[in-house]
Image (cartoon, rainbow, N blue to C red):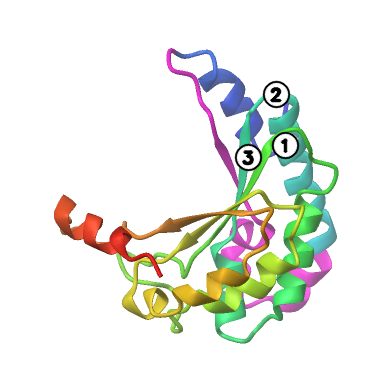
Amino acid sequence: RSRVGHADAYRREAQLPGSVRKATVVSPFEMLVTAADQQEALQQQMPSLLRIVNQEIRALADAGCPHVQLDAPVLGILVNQQMMEPAQAAAIVAACFEGVSGVTRGLHLCNGNNRGRPFSAVLRNAPWVPILAGLDGVIDVANLEASYFSEYLEREAFRDLPRSMELAAGIVDEANYWVEPVKSTLHGVAYNP
């Protein structure tokens, strides 16, 4: 049995028709988002939290999950709001994936979702490029929010993405309840510098 339950769920779901090709594990910060006002206690528990997340990711890889993604919106928010250095965020992600190989390793960064609104007061994605630069060879796919206009304006920053990493840019606003017409989505992806 896995400690958090993601690997157990993957094993169950993988038996269903169509199977499962990807599983996501939340980062240590997402596990304790309700304790954000208790930074000292959070930092004391960080080694244990990193170990739990790493064990869960390893369990998914051992169970045969072909693509394991770390869901880490809080890291993106903290870096955007200059409450954490990109190198520190990269070190946390690297610790989560320590010893994991033979699978596609993904990372999801965004500005959070608070009832249809971004959690972060700073809507940017260019500050995440230094995080990704520090994860060259650790992360295979960077799944990044790119649905806000301010983020779209920073698209040139992704030219500096490590060559070993694929970019999965989230251009559809999943937090918006409006159904976006296909034509609008196609216009958003048609830009090619």
* Residue identifier under label 3: 68
Q: Looking at the image, tell me whether mark 3 or mark 1 is earlier in sequence order.
A: 1
* Residue identifier under label 1: 3
Judge whether residue 29 is colored magenta.
yes
Instruction: Measuring from the top left, give residue 82's x and y in whole percent.
Output: 62, 87
Q: Looking at the image, tell me whether mark 3 or mark 2 is earlier in sequence order.
A: 2
Residue at figure coordinates x 45%, y 66% from the top left: 112
Residue located farthest toward the front when viewing the structure as drawn: 193
Q: Looking at the image, tell me whether mark 2 or mark 1 is earlier in sequence order.
A: 1
Viewer-side residue, 98 vs 53: 98
Q: Nearer the viewer, mark 2 or mark 1?
A: 2
Q: Quadrant of the C terminus?
A: bottom left
Residue at mark 2 to residue at mark 1: CA–CA distance: 14 Å
Residue type at numbered disc 3: Val
Residue type at numbered disc 1: Arg
* Residue identifier under label 2: 63
- The image quadrant of residue 80 is bottom right
